[in-house]
Amino acid sequence: MTKTFAEKSLNRAFLGMLALVSATSILSNSCNQKKDKKESEKMIHNDHPVAKIVPKIHDKHVPADKRVIYLTFDDGPNRGTENLLKILHKRNVCATAFLVGKHAYGSKKQQEDLQLLRKDRLIELANHSFTHAHNKYTDFYKNPIAVVHDFDTAKDSLKLYDKIARTPGRNIWRLNNITVTDLKSSTEAANSLKKAGYKVIGWDLEWKPTNKMALKGNHEAMLKRVDSIFFNDLEKTSRHLVFLTHDQYLTDADSINELDLFIEKLQKSNRFVFRKISEYPGINEILN
């Protein structure tokens, strides 16, 4: 008989009351605390309430039958940013927004959305370049010096003091313990970013769009992919999955609902905790 993800996790769990006590502690301290059910069913349409500061969760406090998910959203501030914030507040779950510098100045609405992101304690901000490579990725990565300059410009203009970054159009990782480059032609640029002190984070799972820039497929399919990655140990760091999608895919009612259901069912399964990317294992180490 094929094992389910839950069965696999339970087989690895600690026995006895220790696991139960640890699990209770996690659920009371993680950034996906449950709200009153009636309140949680309401979307926030006006100002976002100030969320409580979320305590950090350390690996030794995560029971063996739990897994950690990092929700990350690229290309903001953009169309859909405000809808993203509504979903996060409805579910009271934290996430990381990888911002594009020039988008912060693209329109009055984008400037307003940037201020919403800055004030929101459920969100942390990270660097996704200033120009987004002008969407000409091959040319962009041919010039490593220009790549570093582009990220420095975004860092300074957006006042991002923690040098956590994600490369546009590339799934690249540069931490002390993880070196991954999806296209070899980007290797020198990626190494230059690391040398400049950037902790470069890619992703383990992406929810891609349709040709109409809406989320492709449904939440049930994405939930199965989450289970598959953990069950087959395909994540870059065991028990930690970095999830990616984009703000601009959250402009239609179906996409908003699918992402909301995805997060809701992850929470209700009681198998996962959520963190911001600054809590990813090893990310705060000084780069070698």
Image (spheres, rainbow, N blue to C red):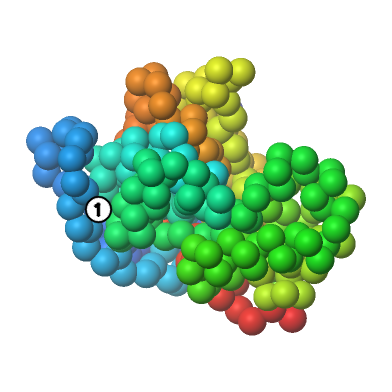
Residue at the location (70% across, 43% down)?
134
Can you say whether 169 is above or below 27 in the image? above
Residue 188 is situated, as x and y percent measured from the top left of the image, at 87, 62
Q: Which residue is mark 1?
A: 33
Residue at figure coordinates x 28%, y 39% from the top left: 86
Name which residue type carries label 1.
Gln
Image quadrant where residue 265 sits:
top left
Quadrant (top left, top right, bottom left, bottom right) of the N terminus: top right
The local secondary structure at tag 1 comes to loop
Is residue 167 or residue 222 the one in the foreground? 167
Q: Give the side of residue 70 with respect to residue 90, left or right.
A: right
Percent across and percent down for residue 250 are: 43, 30
Residue nearer the viewer, 173 or 270: 173
The residue positioned 55% from the left and 18% from the top of the image is: 212
Q: Residue at x 52, y 52 (%)?
A: 99
Q: Nearer the viewer, residue 233 or 18?
A: 233
Residue 185 sits above or below residue 205 on the image? below
Determine whether 235 is above or below 152 in the image. Answer: above
Q: Quadrant of residue 18?
A: bottom left
Classify residue 105 as left or right of residue 23.
right
Position in image of residue 272 (x %, y %)? 41, 49
Coordinates of residue 149 in the picture (x, y in percent): 72, 66
Q: Does the rendering let one see residue 21? A: no
Residue 131 falls left or right of residue 261:
right
The number of callouts visible is: 1
Q: Quadrant of residue 91?
A: top left
| CA neighbours of label 1 inside 10 A, class few (<14), some (14 to 19), many (20+) | some
Image position of 207 (left or right of 53): right
